[in-house]
């Protein structure tokens, strides 16, 4: 993703797949939360930037509840990335910023 083109067709398809899976596995009540936690963990810890970006996209598609720990992790990761703003990292920075945007949208007004 770039500043000009933030939405990628493959990300939209991934989002649709994630939503379909959550709908199909409705009997697993906490799937959205547990999968969201795991996706965010992968987004922060995965050494493959491509897989980390896909994990951000999955997290955004799931829209799990926002926790302060998740926000802090994302902000720390953003800080690390901005400390070395090479072109290869800027796409990852955009993924982090879009994830933070979705988190703010999911927060209750009094939390923001």
Image: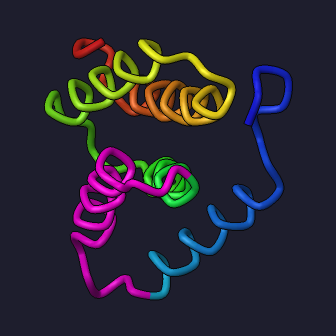
Quadrant holding the C terminus? top left
Seen from the viewer's position, the closer of residues 18 and 56 is: 56
Question: In which quadrant of the rendered view does residue 69 lie?
Answer: top left
**Residue 104, placed above or below residue 46:** above
Q: Position of residue 106 (x, y in %)?
A: 40, 33
Seen from the viewer's position, the closer of residues 21 and 49 is: 49
**Residue 20, placed above or below residue 34:** below
Question: In which quadrant of the rendered view does residue 3 lie?
Answer: top right
Q: Position of residue 104 (x, y in %)?
A: 41, 23
Seen from the viewer's position, the closer of residues 2 and 36 is: 2
Q: Position of residue 70 (x, y in %)?
A: 23, 36
Quadrant holding the N terminus? top right
Q: Identify the magenta region.
A: 25-49
Seen from the viewer's position, the closer of residues 17 and 96 is: 96
- Identify which residue is drawn at 34% across, 57% down: 42
Q: Position of residue 85 (x, y in %)?
A: 56, 16
Q: Is residue 14 magenta?
A: no
Q: Main secondary structure of the magenta part?
A: helix
Decide if residue 61 is on the left or right side of residue 78: right
């Amino acid at each position: 993703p770039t500043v000009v083109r933030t939405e990628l067709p493959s990300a939209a398809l991934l989002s649709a797949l994630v939503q379909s899976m959550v709908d199909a596995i409705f009997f697993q009540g906490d799937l959205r939360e547990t999968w969201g936690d795991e996706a965010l963990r992968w987004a922060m810890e995965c050494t493959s930037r491509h897989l980390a970006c896909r994990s951000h996209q999955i997290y955004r598609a799931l829209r799990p509840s926002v926790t302060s720990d998740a926000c802090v992790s994302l902000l720390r990761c953003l800080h690390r990335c901005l400390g070395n703003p090479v072109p290869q990292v800027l796409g990852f920075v955009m993924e982090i910023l879009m994830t933070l945007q979705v988190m703010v949208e999911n927060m209750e007004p009094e939390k923001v």
